[in-house]
Image: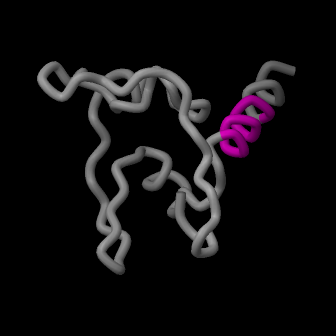
Amino acid sequence: KLNLQRGARLEAISGSVPTPVDLPRMCYFYPRCNAAIQGLCDKEVPPMYDIGDGHQVRCFLYRQQGTIARSAHELAMENRAQEENHES
């Protein structure tokens, strides 16, 4: 998570980390990410983006949002609200 103050705690991601000897052909966080995009995150590994200051991010949401500074929970809530608006 970006834009945190030094010493701030990161949000924990529940679930198990995939074994490095048998990595899935999808985003490694897909099964555990609240903001995962079905049909994208479960189909391919996201590209690596260099975001400066020696930091990199590998997330389709970075491409869509231009930043992943918001928490996955916030993005998931926005995605759900958008889906509900399209259904009504």
Q: Which residues are magenta?
A: 73-81
Please report the residue visible at 40 percent of the width from the left and 29 percent of the height from the top.
40
Asked if residue 46 lies left or right of residue 4, the reply is left
How far from the left and from the top, in percent, is residue 22? 16, 19
Q: Percent x, y for residue 27? A: 34, 32
The x, y position of residue 7, in whole percent, is 60, 69
Q: Is residue 6 visible?
A: yes
Outermost residue toward the left in this view: 21
Seen in the picture, residue 41 relative to 68 is either above or below; the reply is above
Most common SS among magenta residues: helix
Q: In x, y percent, where is residue 19?
A: 23, 23
| Direction from residue 48 to residue 14 in the image, left or right | right
Point 42% across, 44% down: residue? 60
Quadrant housing residue 55 = bottom left
Observer able to see residue 38: no
Q: Is residue 81 above or below residue 52?
A: above
Which residue extends farthest front?
A: 7
